[in-house]
Amino acid sequence: MPDLTPERIIQTGLGFWASKALLSAVELGVFTALGAGGKTGEELVAALGLHQRANPDFFDALVATGMLARDGDGSGARYRNTEATALFLDRSKPTYVGGILEMANARLYRFWGDLTEALKTGKPQNEIKHSGASMFPELYADPARLEQFMDAMTGVSTGNFMALAEKFDFSKYKTLCDVGGAAGVLSIIVARRHPHLSCVTADLPVVAPIAARKIAEAGLSDRVKTQDLDFFKDPLPRADVITMGMILHDWNLENKMMLIRKAYEALPEGGAFIAIEAIIDDARRENAFGLLMSLNMLIEFGEAFDFTGADFSRWCKEVGFKRTEIIPLAGPASAAVAYK
């Protein structure tokens, strides 16, 4: 076996080095500080309030991992954003997706250090382990953290919602309800792309003011409304299309089935239920992101898990849906659709 090397094993095992360098760069605002221009290492140290030891190792590591570009060598070299980091990691741009990375840095990074314990116990390793309170009550008790979480979900989901608006045929439907709609981004994107639709973004009362503000900023208050909803207690609002973006994977099978049943009951004949998730391939061999996301659900909630398209189809048909399909969206995400 002369061609075998341990390179991939070592790179994966030490992958947290590159991950944490990127997460710290986002936290520090490296990509925002660079903007559309360039800076020397000394200028970046001064702009970001770093110790001299950060220069040049930190910035050169970001170059070597493809997160920054550099013009020249030595102390006079100038660092700049790549095309991708300029678009997606500069906080001043509407295309910023760093919210999910900010949350990963502030919360998930340290929780994943206890993955071994989670695998042995099946218990969550997040805030509940230390405070006894689950993730969501902790978030809802702190408006700043709640908005950070919602921004994180926006960052990771916007591309998926845009793809859904393009790929799903909304022409035969008039109304949409996004359950667990957070800041209303799905409703905003779909309503903007399909002017004939009226949309409702439904979530807990503490979320509504944030969503209403985002909807107003988008100039869509006439066609996108907010509605208070506790989907454990309340029936879902009636609509032709019911969407759930990264909602089903937060729960155990019993609660997944409860939500699917409520969606079925709220839809008319011919209506569609759409779950946007990192749907795992049926053979469970290819969608590494979806499988790792399922481990993240173990870290966050214990018994929560991600699922395959075949799982979704089986659950929905058990409830009464006639047929299902999987529509690939952006990256590892898909829309799992069930038709009543």
Image (cartoon, rainbow, N blue to C red):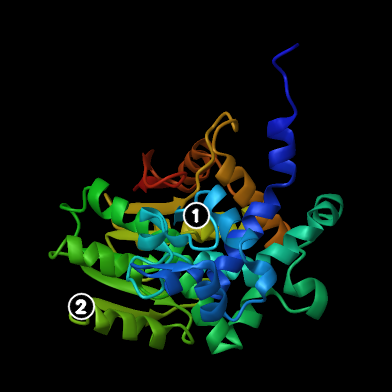
**From what the image shows, is residue 53 above or below residue 18?**
below
The circle on residue 220 is 2
Q: Earlier in the sequence, mark 1 or mark 2?
A: 1
Looking at the picture, does residue 329 appear above or below residue 62?
Answer: above
Q: Nearer the viewer, residue 225 or 32?
A: 32
Residue under circle 1? 67
Cα distance, mark 1 to mark 2? Answer: 36 Å
> Does residue 247 show up?
yes
Percent of width and height locating residue 32 = 43, 72
Going by the image, does 115 lie left or right of 326?
Answer: right
> In the image, 294: left or right of 94?
right
Picture coordinates of residue 5 (x, y %)?
73, 24
Q: Position of residue 110 (x, y in %)?
A: 74, 66
Q: Amino acid at mark 2?
A: Leu
- x and y, in percent, of residue 275 in the image: 43, 53
Judged by depth in the image, the label closer to the viewer, 1 or 2, is 1
| 40 or 146, nearer to the observer | 40
Q: Secondary structure at mark 1?
A: loop
Quarter of the image with the N terminus in it: top right
Please state which of residues 20 and 219 is positioned toward the viewer in this rendering: 20
Amino acid type of the residue that numbered disc 1 sits on in the rendered structure: Met
